Image: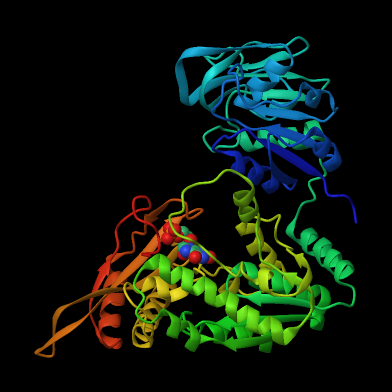
Amino acid sequence: MNKKQTVIVLDFGGQYNQLIVRRVRDAGVYSELLPYSTPIGKIKEIDPVGIIFTGGPNSVFEKDSLCVSSEMLELGIPILGICYGAQLIAHLAGGEVRTATTREYGKQDITYKPAPLFEGISSDSVCWMSHTDYVSRAPQGYEILASTKTCPIAAFGNIQKKIYGVQFHPEVVHTSGGQQILKNFLFRIIGAAGDWTMSNFVADMTEKIRQKVGDKKVLCAMSGGVDSAVAATLVYKAVGPQLTCMLVDHGLMRKNECEQVLSVFRDGLGMNLYKIDAADRFIHRLAGVTDPEKKRKIIGEEFIRVFEDEGKKLGKVNFLVQGTIYPDVIESGFGKSATIKSHHNVGGLPSVIDFDEIIEPLRDLFKDEVRRVGFELGLSKEIVMRQPFPGPGLAIRIIGDVTREKLDILREADAIFREEIAHNNLDTEIWQYFAVLTGMRSVGVMGDMRTYDYTIALRAVTSIDAMTADWARIPYPVLEKISTRIVNEVRSVNRIVYDITSKPPATIEWE
Ligand code: XMP
């Protein structure tokens, strides 16, 4: 197995940092985001083929500005500094950075000089700027390689040392030829192999898992979600029957969800997968609870109890598979924000199962890469393109207390909504869509009779990462059909509303 070529993206707090990693990977080179404070020893250990310094909100001459040792420029590793990263290179290499009186923001005309970084790009082009500080003098040994009307040193570089700085953002789509600039850095300047593909990933990872596991036993808790399904399939491909999977049915799944998971993975692929029927205990503990955070807490606790009981039966396990993916890793390692909702998955498992080691085969991958791995492993579109489903399941889509009756009503309404969205081929453009059982009842009339029944809300959003979302513009005829079908086919429902709030200010889930 060849050593994986890595480009390290050093994070100085800019808003496009993950995007830079994505762009590098899209070009076929593996890339990782690391904090700017990563010790230089660790960087040498990783032995990257290139380093990118990101943008960030600081000024290089502020007292506590985020900085790296100037030794970084002497490692003999090609470096590309973007925005703040470019200013940092200028600062470290003895150039000069100043603060402008006004901020330069948005699309700008730019003129490039001939240089390896700009090969294949028209000398007069457009770039995306967002800065106040600027490089006013390039360091000795560095040439000025681009300029805009207001920014005379929009790019500079030391061709011999393969160190470049660009004041603009090549990673955003508004910079024309931006991806080409990144590719020039990767292939013309670094000379990267560009062999980071999902089929290589699958081949390498199955081999790694095989070697690690040997003839020992592996356990995986599947949730029905994409990540755990792909992780389990990868491990299954590597070690076959040495893997045991369990699926906790907490009674809060969507219609036919457990059955589908069993039919695909147990009956179809032949995995050793068994279901734990825990619906009674979850529903019993949720009885009468209306507070959303309390519901989430109870469900999280109950999961751990179920695993605890199961762990006692299973005894010692050698390896435990977790479906951790790269955004989870970045989130837990970097800065933090306020708790809006206490999200949870099957994270409680490691604390109660007696095991030696965790296997996280997807911890380097973004969600769409996980999906590509899923396809590579032969999983169907229904499994791989599945929309996100929260760990606490339908319990947080029922406003007020959770009962079996309400769960049944919601499951039926939700299934109709999903069926119609798929039927109208809207499932790829809408990011997430589901029904909510609002606690509200209202008066209706059906066949001359007064009714007093539930209101179902439909929620459908477009989004890229669930951090922000917009409500999906579902065509009226489709909404009409969904509404008619739900009130006709689902008992105890006489009114349908469509949620037209974006996130923020609303969240995607109602609880
Ligand atoms: P919100 O409602 O916070 O949801 O806008 C953002 C995304 O996260 C999902 N979600 C969860 N996922 N465990 C999960 O695995 C949870 O507890 C949880 N709560 C919300 C939600 O479905 C949406 O995709």
Q: Is residue 299 above or below residue 510?
A: below
Image coordinates for residue 241, horizontal then vertical, percent: 80, 83
Asked whether, in this view, residue 497 is left or right of residue 444, the answer is: right
Q: Is residue 60 above or below residue 274?
A: above
Which one is in front, 438 or 187?
Answer: 438
Q: Quadrant of residue 177?
A: top right
Q: Is residue 270 visible?
A: no
Residue at 79% across, 75% down: 237
Q: Is residue 229 above or below residue 49?
A: below
Image coordinates for residue 236, horizontal then vertical, percent: 77, 76
Figure quadrant of the C terminus: bottom left
Which one is in front, 284 or 20?
Answer: 284
Count of numbered circles in the view? 0
Asked whether, in this view, residue 245 is left or right of residue 304, the answer is: right
Image coordinates for residue 344, horizontal then vertical, percent: 54, 65
Residue at 51% across, 67% down: 387
Q: Is residue 148 visible?
A: yes
Residue at 82% across, 73% down: 238
Asked whether, in this view, residue 413 is left or right of residue 354, the answer is: left
Figure quadrant of the N terminus: bottom right
